[in-house]
Amino acid sequence: MTSNPLPLNISRFGGCTLTGALSVTTQVRDTVTIVHGPKGCTHHNFSLLHATGLDNDRVTLPDLISTGLVESDIIFGGEGALERTLDAVAKRNIGAIFVLSTCIVDSIGDDVAAVCRRNRGVPVLPVPSGGFLGGTFQNGMNNALNAIADTAEPCQKGWCVNIIGEKNLEYEVEENCAEVTRLLTALGISVNLRFLRDCSMIDITRLGAARLNILRDDDLRTVGERLHQRFATPFISSFPVGLAGTNDFLESVADSFGVKNLRAVREEKVLQEEILTEFKDITGTSITFDPALTDSDTFKIACEVADRIDITIDRDGCRVPLEISPPVGTAGVRRMLHRWRRAIHA
Amino acid sequence: MPECENPLWPCAMTGAASCLAGFDGITVVIHGSSGCYYYPATLLHVPLHGTFINENEVIFGSEQRLHEVLDGLFGKGKKIAVVMTCVPAILGEDVLSMLKDYDVILVDSPGFSGDIEAGYKKALSVLAPSVDPDKEGINIDGACLFDPFSWGNVREIVRLLGCASVPVGTVFCSDRLESVGNAAAYTVGTNLDFSSGVGTWLGGTLGFEEISTTFERIASIFPEADPGPVDTEIEREDERIVRACDKFLRRFDPPQAVIFSGFSYATFAARTLKQYLDADILYVGFRNEPGTSPYPGGYVQGFSRVTSLLRQFNPDLVIGSSFERSVDPKRAFVGLTPPLRGMVKLAPHSVAGISGTLSFVEDVLNACMDRKK
C-alpha cells in the first residue's frame, strides 16, 4: 500500500463520507445541516464547499452548524451537545434539519439516530456519514440521497426525467447537466428534478413524478434501485460518456419513453463528425496519459476519441490531460480535445 | 453556546501541517482519515502524505498501517513528521512506542485540541528550535503556509534586510529543516499570530511605523547594518500613499470599514486605514483570541456572526476573506484573510514590509473607487 493519494484504493482514498453527504444536503435551500463533531470538520467542509461554489459562480454559502465538540465531550460523550444544538436550530423556520455524524462521533459511540428521534416540530434527518467509518465520499452521497428520497411520496408520472446524484463538487457540474438537458431536449423530454442540486424540500416532493431517472454514474446504482423500488421509476445508470456512448444514451432514453429516436441520433452523429473535423490539425500525432488512469472508464473514452481522430496512443507520446470522470456527451469530448490540442501544441 | 455556525478558522491539525510542511527536509504524514488529509492538502498547496486510516485501523489498531506508510516514505532523505488527527488521538494507542524504531517527529495536535495557531505552535515546539549564538543575521517569523501572503511577506522582508545589509537567519516556518536548530539570535516578524518565540524579538514589519522602529532597533544591535535605504524608501512611499489617499478624500468620504482577520493583520489594517484615510473603523472581528486593541471589536468565530455584524454596521468597505465577500459581493472588499477562494493568486503579494502597505492601500483605494463609480 502506498501513501500516494491517487485514487488507486477506493476504500482509503475514496474521500470523506462527511464531505460526500454535505455535497448533497447543502443543496437543499430551506434546511440546515448540523455536523456533529469538532468544529474543524465543519470548517474544512465549509471552506471546501465555499471554494467549489465560487468555481461554479455561486456565492451563497451553505448553512452548516457544528456541535463544536471539545476534549471534554470526547471523554464524556457528545450527545448532550447534539441535543442542545438541535433544540436551538429547531426554533428556526426551516424545512428540515440534516444531522451528519463525523468519524470521531462514531468512534466514541454517540447514538445520533436516537437523539434525532425526539419530535422537535421539524423533520430531523440523520445521515450516516461517520468519515472513514462510514465508508467513502460516495457512501456519504448515497446515504444523503437515500435519506432525503425517503421524505417524498409516490405521485403521478409526467413526461420527464430526474437527474440523480450530480457531482456537486465537480468543476463542470453545470456544463455536464446542460449537455444532458440538450440531449433530452432533442428527444422532447424535460428535466423534472435535479436530485439534488439547488432545490427546496417542496421540490423534492416531485421526485416520484419522473418516468425515468438518469444517474450521474454507476456508483449511484444503489440509489437508483432504491428509487425504483419506492417510485417504480427505472433508471439509466450513467450520464452519456464518449461519442458512441452519447448515441447509446439517446437510444436508451428514447426506448424508455417509447419514442422514435432516429433523427436525434442522426443529428448527434453529424455534430460529432463536425467536431472531429475541427481537430484535424492534431490528426497523426501521438499522445499518452497519466498511467494511473489506464484502467479507468476515462481511458476507454480517450482511446475511442483518439481512434476516431487518428491519434496514436504511445508511451512516448505527448502527455495530455485526462480527468478521472469521463467527458460527458459530445460537448465534453469537444472540451477534452481542446485540452489535448493545447498540450500537443505547447 | 457550544455550537458554532459555519466555523471560520481551521483546526489544530491544519496548523501543525502548515508549520511542518513549510520546512524543506520534512515529509508530513497526516495520521487520520482521508477527510482530514484532503483539507490541508488542498489548502496548503504542498505535497502531504496520509495514512488514510479506515474502520479496520479503528478496530484493530493503526500500528500496521502507520508502519506501512512510513516504510514507503523512508530512505528518501527527509525527516518524517506524523501529525495526529482526532480519531487516532482517542484510540488510546501508544503511538510513540509504535514509532520507536523510526526516526520520526510526532505531533499530537488533534482538531478538537484547538485552532490553527495552537497546532502551529505545538508543531514548532516539537521541532525544538534553538539559537546558535554564532549564527549571523536575523530570523524572520510568522510565515505560515496557511496565510496566502506568507511567501510574499518573506520575499519582502528578505529584500528589506538585504537593503539594510543584514543577513537572513532562519525563516519560521519556511526554510530548510537544518536551520531550525541553527537560528540567529534575533527575530523580526511578519505576522505575530504565528510568531515562533525564537530569538530576541526586534519587532514587526506591518506598516511603515513598525518597520521604521524595527529597523532602528536592528541598527542599534548590528553596527554594520544600514537602515538608511529602508528609511529613504519608506519616506518616498509614504508620500506616494499620502498623495493617493489625499486625492481620494478630495472626492469621497473616508471609508466606514469592518475588518475580519487574525489579530495581527486586522490591527494593521485598522491602523493603516485610520492613518491614511481617516477611516471610521466600525468593528474589528478577530478570527483568533484578540489581544489589546484600540478599536471596537471582538472574537468572531462563526459566519452567522459575520453576517449579523455586516448587517448591523452596513460598512462601505469590508476587509476579510472570501467568506465575508460572499455576504454582499457588491460591497467594496479587500482580501486580507484566508481563505481567499474564487480568485487567482500567482504573484507573491505581501502584507508585511513596504510593499505590503503599498499593496494594501492600493487595494483599498481601488476597491472603494470601483464601488463609488
Image: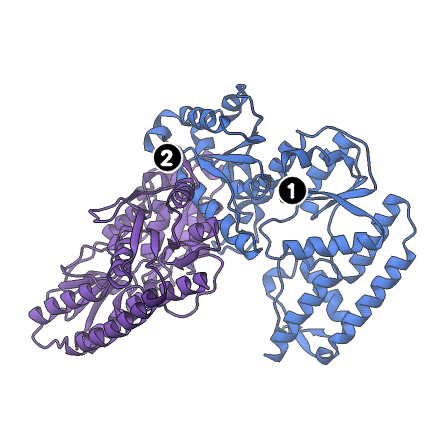
Chain colours: A blue, B purple
Where in the figure is residue B359, as x and y percent of width and height? 34, 68
Chain of the residue under label 1? A
Q: Could you tell me the amino acid type at mark 2?
A: Ile
Q: Is residue B244 above or below residue B125?
A: below
Which one is nearer the viewer's eye here, A28 or A140?
A: A28
Where in the figure is residue B276, as x and y percent of width and height? 26, 64
**Residue pictured at 29% horizontal, 48% vertical:** B117
Graded by Cα atoms within 10 Å as few (under 14), some (14 to 19) or many (20 or more), the crowding at tag 2 reads: some
Q: How many marks?
A: 2
Q: Which residue is mark 1?
A: A196
Where in the figure is residue A206, as x and y percent of width and height? 73, 35
Q: Secondary structure at mark 1?
A: loop
Which one is nearer the viewer's eye here, B76 or A199?
A: A199
Residue A317 in sight here: no
Circle number at residue A207: none
Q: Secondary structure at mark 2?
A: helix
Q: Quadrant of the N terminus of chain B?
A: top left
Residue B65 left/right relative to B207: right
For this orientation, the residue located farthest to the top is A119
Residue A30 in sight here: yes
Q: Is residue B229 above or below residue B316?
A: below
**Residue pictured at 44% horizontal, 50% vertical:** B323
Chain of the residue under label 2? B
Which one is nearer the viewer's eye here, B288 or B15?
A: B288
Q: Could you tell me the amino acid type at mark 1?
A: Leu
Residue A138 left/right relative to B129: right
To which quarter of the image does residue A209 belong?
top right
**Residue pictured at 58% horizontal, 26% vertical:** A123
Q: Which residue is mark 2?
A: B90
Q: Is label 2 on the same chain as label 1?
A: no
To which quarter of the image does residue A67 belong?
top left
